Amino acid sequence: MYNTKSSFQALNRRKFLKYGSLALGTGLLSACVGNSTNTTNAETTSSTTSGKLDKVSLGTSWFAQAEHGGFYQAVATGLYQEHGLDVSIRMGGPQVNGNQLLMAGTVDFKMGYAIDAIKAIESGIPKITVAAMFQKDPQALLAHPNAGNDSFEDLKGKKILLSTSAHTTFWPFLKQKYGYSDSQIGVYTFNVGPFVADKNLVQQGYITSEPHKIEQEGGFKPVELLMADHGYTPYSSTIEAKRELVERNPDLVQRFVDASIKGWYSYLEDPAPANVLIKQDNPEMTDEQLAYSLSKINEYGIVKSGDAETLGIGAMTQKRWTEIYTSMVEAGVFQPNLNYQEAFTLDFVNKGVNAYV
């Protein structure tokens, strides 16, 4: 899923290794040869012979999936072109460092998440968040049914499988709020097999992805505990850019944000155009998984809840960013008195729903 905000699509070890190599190769190729003709299918679809379009690129957080649907939709339906842009999409993956690609100029925009944006301020990385496509982070904890693990409170002392990035994002929040300890941590390798085999295990997972994989492999529906519905407030699937680009060419940034927001409205209404490109870029993706992911996005209000209901998709507020920062200070993730306001700008969003539909 961006940097360390990974969209955690369940993969077995074979697929993980296969697509990890693919994603790494794509990133290195892009960094070395720039506007090479060796691009993804989405890049090919969006290319044009017109010299009037501004060429820009977007780095996603993971392999192509429904969680990226609005961006692919804006390519597939010509929304980017209508806003004077020729947009190429470069897939992320477990071995792709999105921040490095952004700082190197290999991509102009990248999918990110709020916690990493604030961390960048601590590290002196000159990037800034310009929109938040997900009002809720889809990250959840998943448990077996009928195992006594039906709430976050029930999970204290239980073994929980986590990825490395979780240790510095949602895990400190869970420890602070529910009294969990590091002794509970197991290793999540993006393979649901260990969880399926042991009813006492709990694992992290995207609410839009892993539950479907678990049901396929294990024949049961897991208990879904979405952290965003229990006080975990970070924005997710944000749009990030180098601060230099935002200051030098705000018109280009605005056009990219507007077209991407419109792409998300369009995708939620009719995902078919984007799904064609998603499956081209990620041949392992299925129609069933795409439909499942979109249903969960809608069910949990991942995109259109909260401030987005009135301010439009992509909405962000000062109040919400303050809540994010304050909660992470309490969890020990950030130091107090950090100038976290440098992590974002509200200049490009909050126009209201009618501005985009």
Image (spheres, rainbow, N blue to C red):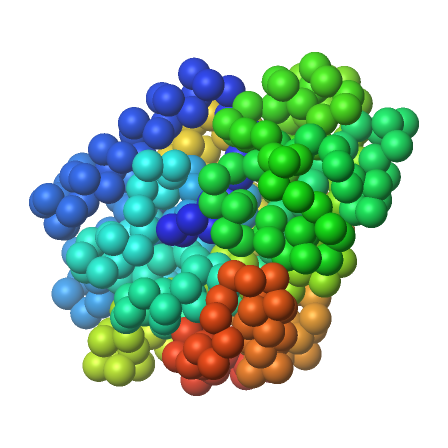
Q: Residue at x 29, y 27 (%)?
A: 21
130 relative to 262 in the view: left or right: left
In this view of the protein, which residue sits in the foreground, 200 or 195?
Answer: 200
Residue 84: in sight, yes or no?
A: no
2 relative to 154 in the view: left or right: left
In this view of the protein, which residue sits in the foreground, 67 or 80?
Answer: 67
Task: Judge whether 321 appears above or below 169 on screen.
Answer: below
Task: Judge whether 302 appears above or below 27 on screen.
Answer: below
Q: Quadrant of residue 245?
A: bottom left
In this view of the protein, which residue sits in the foreground, 207 or 337?
Answer: 337
Residue 49: in sight, yes or no?
A: yes
Q: Residue at x 23, y 33 (%)?
A: 25
* Residue 319 position within the rendered picture, expressed as x and y whole percent measured from the top left: 61, 82
Q: Quadrant of residue 203?
A: top right
Q: Residue furthest left?
A: 33
* Residue 6 position within the rendered picture, expressed as x and y whole percent measured from the top left: 47, 45
Q: Residue at x 15, y 65 (%)?
A: 51
Task: Judge whether 121 appears above or below 33 on screen.
Answer: below
In this view of the protein, which residue sits in the foreground, 110 or 310?
Answer: 110
Q: Residue at x 36, y 21 (%)?
A: 18
Report how many numbered discs are placed on residues in the image: 0
* Residue 347 position within the rendered picture, expressed as x and y whole percent measured from the top left: 43, 84
- The quarter of the picture where the C terminus appears is bottom right
* Residue 260 position within the rendered picture, expressed as x and y whole percent measured from the top left: 45, 64
